[in-house]
Image (cartoon, grey):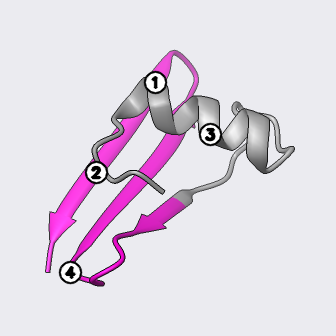
Amino acid sequence: MDFRKSIDGLAALVELGINVAMFAPVLFVFLSSHHNRVKILYWQRNGFFFWLKRL
């Protein structure tokens, strides 16, 4: 996965690649290839939560 993707790119990746409704109550977790960054995407009622953490 290209770790430069942000909210829209990750949401498209989830909908097209994982076959899960983007608005399901699920945390989508993406880990960088070097395992030093994690991105978490979550939908709540009216918008996305997007977390990025550098480990």
Which residue appears at 86% of the width and 44% of the height?
19
Instruction: Give the secondary structure at mark 2.
Output: strand
Instruction: Give the quadrant of residue 43.
Output: top right
Mark 2 and mark 3 in contact (Cβ < 8 Å)? no
Find disc 1 in the rendering and name its residue: 8
Find disc 2 in the rendering and name its residue: 51
Instruction: Give the quadrant of residue 39.
Output: bottom left
On the image, the x and y values in percent for residue 50 come to 34, 42
Mark 1 and mark 3 in contact (Cβ < 8 Å)? no
Front-lying residue, 18 or 48: 18
Q: CA distance from mark 3 to mark 2?
A: 16 Å
Please tell me the numbered disc located at residue 13: 3
Which residue appears at 46% of the width and 20% of the height?
47
Q: CA distance from mark 1 to mark 2?
A: 13 Å
User: Is 7 drawn above or below residue 28 in the view shown?
Assistant: above
Instruction: Give the secondary structure at mark 4.
Output: loop
Which of pointers 2 and 4 lies earlier in the amino acid sequence? 4
Find disc 4 in the rendering and name its residue: 36
Badge 4: few (under 14), some or many (20 or more) residues near its Cα, within 10 Å? few
On the image, the x and y values in percent for residue 16 come to 77, 35
Quarter of the image with the C terminus is bottom left
Q: Which residues are magenta?
A: 29-55
